[in-house]
């Protein structure tokens, strides 16, 4: 049975970040910064409450008589209790005989063009551990993008205004960045397992390293760009955030309304229509929060029973990173034009270059992951290199067609010019012949 390391990592980040937030808020209170204290507590306690609700919802504790569990979740101690329960199940799994097992069928990755279907027995303890892992994965994503991402942006903004980075704030920002990167990593793994549910997916350690580097560069550069822009244009950042947020929040609903599909009723049998609407609204809120800072790796599809699109859309991926790169460049340009005296000792052109190169480095690691380390790359219809070669061929063909058209146009212009010149030359040559004829007549 697989060691529940993901559960341990999620709980560690949750406890460490909450403790650091409480400590930092106390320092703000002692320093007289009431606004910073309130925002720090808001971005810490709100995702904590959402994490408790997620764990209760996944395990369906509302419909069971477990008052102690509900009380622990109300006291914000639910993740600790769940982690203790997970390790109890893991330690007892080899000593207690399973009363019954279920059989699952998974297909292996194709080898030499063939794919075998393998049956696997799943015991009751392993099924419970799978449920716990799934719950903590979703909780990590919520903690990362509805709590850690705004928290990191806030603390970096305070550091820029005060031109000072304390040890506590530095440690808090490092923990927040790790939490965001870990949440983005869980998004990638979750997307892969949902899209290729019928296959036995095994992610290699180098794939984790590549995803970690990809997400670290992408999220760090994005947060720094937002902080720099906010520090000089505080009013305009509201418009930028609202446009980004509502674009991604409304996009799944627009696709759903355009498809003409009926309202989904199979998310959870115990939920009413209002409850289903609330759950879908929360999912689109989380989807928008993820795409504010990085590529979500999953495409929310409301009319799909799994709520996730299983198709690999390279076009959306390309458009997202192109638009995000342009947006980052524009925000950095606006910061450069309106920067204040607090950036007097900062080499602005070098910082802009570093941030743009950092974002391109994130894209490079993403391409490396999809080309070499994706666990299901054998199922792709075309690899990244093949797609890049096809794109180069299309560009070359377009350039050749354009040059041929230009050359044909020049040839046509020359032929038209030659046609225009031939009548005038005939007129010039006819004049001397007439003069010669008149001279001959006069001499006669």
Image: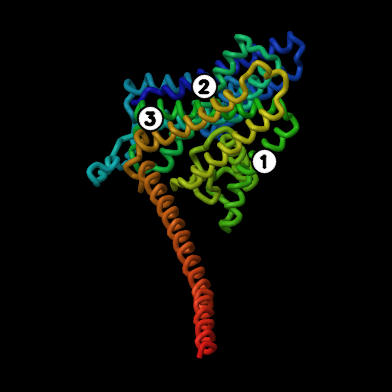
Q: Residues within 10 Å of mark 2 (few under 14, many from 20)?
A: some
The residue tagged 2 is 178
Dividing the picture into quadrants, the one containing residue 64 is top right
The residue tagged 1 is 243
The front one of 346 and 83 is: 346
Dividing the picture into quadrants, the one containing residue 116 is top left
Dividing the picture into quadrants, the one containing residue 288 is top right
- Residue 243 locus on image (x, y percent): 67, 41
Q: Residues within 10 Å of mark 1 (few under 14, many from 20)?
A: few
For mark 1, give the secondary structure.
helix
Measured in 3D between alpha carbons, the distance from the residue under mark 2 to the one under mark 1, in whole angstroms, is 27 Å
Q: Measuring 44% from the left and 46% from the top, which residue is drawn there?
A: 312
Relative to 399, residue 347 above or below: above
The front one of 28 and 233 is: 233
Using the rendered image of the protein, determine whether residue 275 is visible from the camera's viewpoint: no
Q: Earlier in the sequence, mark 2 or mark 3?
A: 2
- Residue 268 locus on image (x, y percent): 54, 43
Q: Measuring 42% from the left and 38% from the top, which residue is drawn there?
A: 192
Q: Earlier in the sequence, mark 1 or mark 3?
A: 3
Measured in 3D between alpha carbons, the distance from the residue under mark 2 to the one under mark 3, in whole angstroms, is 17 Å
Q: Earlier in the sequence, mark 2 or mark 1?
A: 2
């Amino acid at each position: 049975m697989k060691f529940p390391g993901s559960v341990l990592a999620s709980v560690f980040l949750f406890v460490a970040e909450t403790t650091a937030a409480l400590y930092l808020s106390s320092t703000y209170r002692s320093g007289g910064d009431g606004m910073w204290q309130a925002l720090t507590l808001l971005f810490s306690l709100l995702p904590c409450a959402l994490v408790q609700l997620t764990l209760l919802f996944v395990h369906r504790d509302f419909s069971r008589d477990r008052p102690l569990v509900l009380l622990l979740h109300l006291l914000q101690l639910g993740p600790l209790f769940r982690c203790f329960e997970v390790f109890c199940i893991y330690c007892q799994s080899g000593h207690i005989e399973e009363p019954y097992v279920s059989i699952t069928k998974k297909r292996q990755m194709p080898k030499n063009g063939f794919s075998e279907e393998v049956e696997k027995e799943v015991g009751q303890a392993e099924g419970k551990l799978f449920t716990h892992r799934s719950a903590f994965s979703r909780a990590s994503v919520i903690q990362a993008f509805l709590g850690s991402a705004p928290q990191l942006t806030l603390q970096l903004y305070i550091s820029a205004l005060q031109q000072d980075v304390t040890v506590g704030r530095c440690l808090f920002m490092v923990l927040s960045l790790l939490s965001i990167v870990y949440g983005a990593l869980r998004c990638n793994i979750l997307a892969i397992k949902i899209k290729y549910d019928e296959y036995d997916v095994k992610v290699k350690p180098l794939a984790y390293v590549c995803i970690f580097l990809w997400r670290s560069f992408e999220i760090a550069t994005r947060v720094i760009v937002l902080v720099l822009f906010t520090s000089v244009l505080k009013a305009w950042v509201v418009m930028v955030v609202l446009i980004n947020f509502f674009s991604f929040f409304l996009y799944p609903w627009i696709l759903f309304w355009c498809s003409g599909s009926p309202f989904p009723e199979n998310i959870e049998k115990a939920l009413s229509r209002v409850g289903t609407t609330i759950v879908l609204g929360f999912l689109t809120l989380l989807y928008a929060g993820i795409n504010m800072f990085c590529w979500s790796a999953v495409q929310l599809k409301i009319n799909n029973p799994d709520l996730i699109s299983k198709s690999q859309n390279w076009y959306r991926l390309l458009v997202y990173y192109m638009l995000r790169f342009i947006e980052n460049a524009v925000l950095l340009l606006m910061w450069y034009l309106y920067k204040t005296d607090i950036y007097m000792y900062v080499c602005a052109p070098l910082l802009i270059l570093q941030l743009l190169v950092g974002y391109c480095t994130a894209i490079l690691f993403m391409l490396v992951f999809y080309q070499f380390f994706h666990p299901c790359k054998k199922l792709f219809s075309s690899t990244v290199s093949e797609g890049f070669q096809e794109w180069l061929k299309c560009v070359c063909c377009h350039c050749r067609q354009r040059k041929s058209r230009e050359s044909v146009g020049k040839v046509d212009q020359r032929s038209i010019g030659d046609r225009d010149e031939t009548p005038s030359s005939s007129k010039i040559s006819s004049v001397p012949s007439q003069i010669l004829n008149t001279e001959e007549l006069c001499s006669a």
